[in-house]
Image (tube, rainbow, N blue to C red):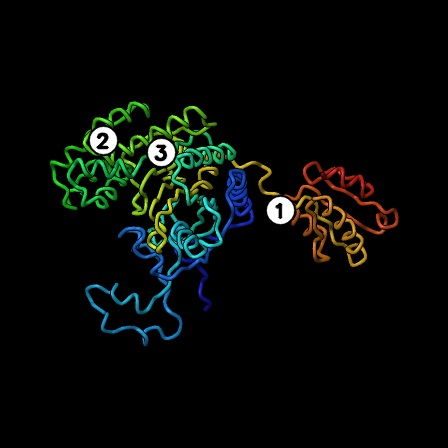
Amino acid sequence: MAQKPSIPKGTRDFNPEQVAKRHYIFNTIRGAFETFGFQPIETPSFENSDTLMGKYGEEGDRLIFKILNSGDYLSKANSEAYDSKNSNKLTPSISEKALRYDLTVPFARYVVQHQNEIEFPFKRYQIQPVWRADRPQKGRFREFFQCDADVVGSQSLWQEVEFIQLYDTVFSALKLEGVTIKINNRKILSGIAEVIGASDKLIDFTVALDKLDKIGEEKVKEEMLGKGISEEGIAKLQPLFTLSGSFESQIDSLKTILSASEEGQKGIEELAFINTAISELGLKTAALQLDVTLARGLNYYTGAIFEVSAPKDVKMGSIGGGGRYDDLTGIFGMKNVSGVGISFGLDRIFLVLEELDLFPETVNKNVEVLFINFGEKEALFSLKAINELRSQGINSELYPDTAKMKKQMNHANKRAIPFVVLVGDQEIESNTYTLKNMATGEQHKVPLKELISLVK
C-alpha cells in the first residue's frame, strides 16, 4: 500500500490564489524598499554552523535547524564528545552547517566577506525564506519568509526615522490601517538593569521582560526571580509595568526612573530625537508608540528596537520588528560598523490581510480568455489570435485537448475564466471569432481587433 503523502509540521503548500496574494505583498514591500534606496542581495539558505550559533541567545540557538554532514556522518563523529546527559556536545562532529534562522546574521557575514566591494553606508534589502524549529501555531511556522531592509556604516538616527516611515509606507500601501509601530531602546533596558542591580543578568532580564504580553506581569516576575534577580530589584520595576500615556509623558517618567544611569539617559535622548522627527514629518496611517517593556530577545541589538502590531481588532503576534546593532559585524572581525534594520513578517501580514479582507480583487490575475479546442486546424487558427492577445498583455490560453465541449466549458467555469472563444469552420472562413461572456451568457462573432477591445 502506497504511503499517504504529507509535509513536515510548520510548513505549507500554497495554491495559485495564495501565491498571487503573497506576490502582491512581496511586490508592495519590494517597491517601497527600492523607493527608499535599498539594493537587493541574496545569501545561501544554509550557513556554516559557527556563523549562526551564539548569535541569537540560548533560546534562539535551540531553534536553529542543524544539517547532518553528508555521507556516513556517524563514522566520522567524535565518539569521545558524546555525553548521554548532554548530546549537544556531539553535534559539532556530525553537523557543520545549519539552515539560516534569520537574514540579519547572514547579512553581517556578507558585509564582512564583501567589505572591499561595498560602498558604505550600504542599504540592502533581502526577501528570502528562513527556518526555525519552533512549535507551530497560528501565525508561527517553521519555514517562512522574511523581508528585511538594513543600513550598515552609519550611526545616524535619521536611519531609524526613515525605517519608521518605511513601515508606514508599506502598511499604508497595503491598506492596512491602524498598525502600531512600537519602539524602545536597548540602552534604556541596560539602564533599568543597572538601576535594579541586575547588570550582570541583562540577557535574562530582557528575555523575561520580552514575554510580558504573552505570559503576564506575575509570570515575568517569577521568571526573573528564577534567574536570580532579587525581589528588591524586581520591586523597582513596578513603575515600568504601569507606565502609560503619551510618548512625551513616558519619556519624562523615564528621565526620573533612570536618573542614575548614564546609559539609560542616552537611550532616552535617542528616543526623544526620533519621536520629535516623526512628529514633525507625520505618518500616513500608522502610529508610533513607546513601549518600555519591549525587549526583543535577540542579543545583538544595542540601540533602538522596533516591533509592529496589527490593528487592535486582529489577534496576531508582531508583523514586523528590528533594531540597531552597533557591533554585529564585530563577531566576524569587522569592528566599529554600526547597523540598523527592520523585518516584515510576510506570513502574518498575509493572515491579517485575509482576515480583514484587504486583498484587492485584481490581485489574482487569472486567465481572461480560454479558446475552445475543436481540432488541429481550429487550434492553429486560435493560437495565432492567442499570440496577439498575449502581446497586448491579455492572459489567454488554448484548451490543450479536443475534449467534449461541455468538459471544456466546465473547465472555464471552475477556473472563473470570464471569456471563452469558439472557433469553427465558419469563423476560419470569415476570419472572425465567437466570443462568449461566461457571466452573462452573451456571445458575439467579432474580428480579432474588436475581440481584443472587448476583453481588455
Compare marks 1 and 3 and give the one earlier in the sequence.
Answer: 3
Is residue 291 rendered to the left or right of residue 367?
A: left
Secondary structure of the residue carrying tag 1 is loop
Q: Which residue is mark 1?
A: 415
| Residue 344 position in % (x across, y down) | 43, 42
Task: Say which amino acid is labelled 1.
Answer: Arg
Quadrant position of residue 264: top left
The local crowd at label 1, few if under 14, some if 14 to 19, many if 20 or more residues have their Cα within 10 Å, is few
Residue farthest right in this picture = 429
Q: Residue at x 35, y 50 (%)?
A: 335
Q: Residue at x 32, y 30 (%)?
A: 290
Residue 240: assigned label: 2
Compare marks 3 and 2 and give the one earlier in the sequence.
Answer: 3
Q: Closer to the camera, 397 or 378?
A: 397
Secondary structure of the residue carrying tag 3 is strand
Task: Say which amino acid is labelled 3.
Answer: Lys
Camera-near label (1 vs 3) is: 3
Q: Residue at x 33, y 28 (%)?
A: 272
Q: Which residue is mark 3?
A: 182
Is residue 4 rendered to the left or right of residue 406?
A: left
| Residue 52 position in % (x across, y down) | 35, 56
| Residue 424 position in % (x across, y down) | 81, 51
The local crowd at label 2, few if under 14, some if 14 to 19, many if 20 or more residues have their Cα within 10 Å, is some
Vertical comparison of 64 with 323: above or below: below
